Amino acid sequence: MMAAGPAGRRAPLKGTGRIGRHGVVMTGTGRSAGSGRAASGVPVAGAVAAFALSRTLLLLWVLKVLPVRGPDVTSDVAVIYRGWYEVLSTGSYPLDDVTWQYPPAAALAVLSPGLVPSLDYVHAFFALVLVCDAAVLGLLLYAGRRPGKSVKGAWFWIAGLPLLGPTAYARYDLMVTAVAVAALLAAARRPGVAGALAGFGAMLKVWPVLLLAGLRQRRAWVAAAVTGAALLLVLTASMPGALAFLGFQRDRGTEVESLGALVFHVARHFGWEGQVLLNYGSVEFLGPYVPWSAVRRSVSPPPHSAGWPCGGCGRRSSRRPPPRTRRSRPCCCSRPRAG
């Protein structure tokens, strides 16, 4: 194609065109389109490579190929989760284990490694967590490649998760996070799907229900309520003890690392009379106003049981509390404060 220049000369136009009813219609250049595809592919390939490298390191940690300083957090999977799996496989929730303090759908996460063939429970659990981790990355990359969006979120995910160390793969929280991320990304275009996923996530570990605060569409709330109620009904009818976790939660304090514990960390410096105790297998605040804490065990990270370190001194609990007991003893960090 040619166009008239300033001096009346014709100069070639970059790009291609077609002749229509209203003249020549330009359709852009093949070069710019190709460079755009190449530019979008480079960060994705880099993100996948960085993910593979960082997750290989995480797997080497949890599989104990590379040593990690500190307590063995993978014992929660090998001892507690597998113990719950054995009980849940009989068709009942852990009625005599006070450390079971999760909503009913958490049983699905604990039972899921049993569906992986040719792997024992621990290795199957790590494999499923890796799949959920990759699913989150895939969702973030998919959302980031839309027009006007960015893949920075994917890079934050790649770089941020390994900072948690082996704990990231030694809990079922990544499974819950994958559901929550899917709900978050579906919120703009499919609020009903987002609500259903939020309801499902809430039945796994409560906190995904907070996603509803950003969903003002009525159908999102209805979908969340219907999904949660349907799951609760099915799980309660199929397995006894689905609501036993409510009783265990009622008698507990607030874990020192949970969001709700922040107010008590501050209150200790202003004369609050509570204590830090090793209680129900975790280090908790117990005392006045603790039952009013809005964020309890189901919203906070998993317990400090089976060798998880004390939040204050790093010492480890030697064993789990026996069933249906409340053996509370002062934590090594709860010495009387001066003044």
Image (cartoon, grey):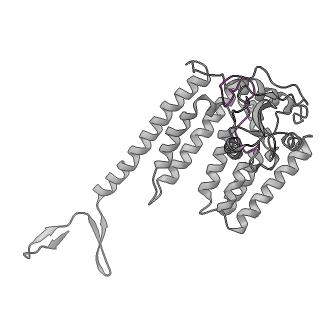
Vertical side of 50 occupied by 78: above or below = above
Is residue 283 highlighted in magenta?
Answer: no
Relative image position of residue 91 (x, y in whole percent): 89, 35
Res 127 → quadrant: top right
Image quarter hosting the C terminus: top right
Vertical side of 108 occupied by 314: above or below = above
Residue occupying image coordinates x 69% and y 62%: 192
Residue occupying image coordinates x 82% and y 32%: 280
The single residue placed furthest to the bottom in the displayed view is 22
Majority secondary structure of magenta residues? loop
Total labels drawn? 0
In this view, the residue in front, 339 or 17, is 339
Relative image position of residue 84 (x, y in whole percent): 81, 30
- Please state if 144 lies on the left or on the right of 327 as rendered: left
In this view, the residue in front, 278 or 289, is 289
Q: Is residue 326 visible?
A: yes
- Over which residues does the magenta segment extend? 298-315
In this view, the residue in front, 91 or 60, is 60
In this view, the residue in front, 306 or 326, is 326
Residue occupying image coordinates x 72% and y 56%: 196
Residue occupying image coordinates x 70% and y 41%: 268
Vertical side of 85 occupied by 143: above or below = below
Relative image position of residue 3 (x, y in whole percent): 17, 73
Image quarter hosting the N terminus: bottom left
Is residue 314 highlighted in magenta?
Answer: yes
The single residue placed furthest to the front in the displayed view is 339
Relative image position of residue 77 (x, y in whole percent): 72, 27
